[in-house]
Image: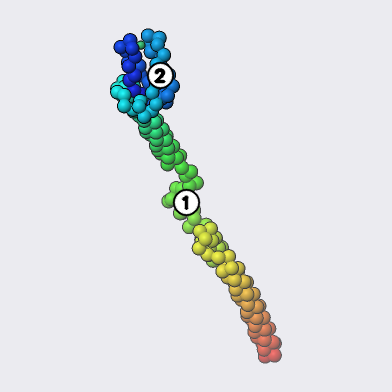
Amino acid sequence: MSQAYLLSCECGQNVSVSASQAGGSAQCTCGKVLEVPTLRRLRELEPDPQADTADANSRDHRAWGVRQGVVLAGGLIALFGGMAAGVMQYAAPQPPGINLELDLERWAEYVDQMTLLQTWEHWHGGMQRLGVADSQQLESYRRELQTHRFLQRILLGVAIAGAVLAVAGGCLGRGRKA
Ligand SMILES: [Zn+2]
């Protein structure tokens, strides 16, 4: 990239010397070793248009090479990334065999056989998996339901006891009557 200057030799040729050679020496193709002036004086010489052009060319070439490489790499990444994404789109894990009509039918049958609590738990489990419901709500519901059922059984027991008593009373009455 260094600027070159034309240093004229006694033989009539021009020797191209770079700024880095300032204060040193350069050899002409005729064999004569020329003293290269200091940088300040070197700059007063005619610049070597060939060196300049060559430098400019190589600079452009390098720049183009880098740009080309970046564009190519970016293009390849985009292409393969896009292809991979496209393949993944089609190779996405499918929900396990949904035959909506059949599955809904089976589900409806299943739900029919479930108790209300089971149905609720299924629904609630789904909600929990979605992070919508909290398990405390489920626990308190279970406790409430257990208490409810316990009271229900007591009431049923009381009812049965009452029925037995009624029947027994009827029998007794009949017995007394009889
Ligand atoms: Zn010469």
Picture residue at 42% right of the left edge, 24% below the top: 23
Question: Can you give x and y, in whole percent of width and height, for residue 54 in the image?
Answer: 34, 22
Judging depth in this view, the residue of 123 and 25 nearest the camera is: 25
Answer with the quadrant where ligand 1 appears in the image: top left
**Amino acid carrying mark 1 in the image:** Asp
Which quadrant of the rendered structure holds the C terminus? bottom right
Residue 55: in sight, yes or no? no
Residue under label 2, please give it.
Answer: 35
Picture residue at 35% right of the left edge, 27% below the top: 41
Question: Can you give x and y, in whole percent of width and height, for residue 149 in the image?
Answer: 61, 73
**Does 97 sit above or below residue 65?**
below
Residue under label 1, please give it.
Answer: 103
Question: Can you give x and y, in whole percent of width and height, for residue 176 in the image?
Answer: 70, 90
Picture residue at 35% right of the left edge, 23% below the top: 4
**Does 152 sit above or below residue 56?**
below
Which quadrant of the rendered structure holds the N terminus? top left
**Amino acid carrying mark 2 in the image:** Glu
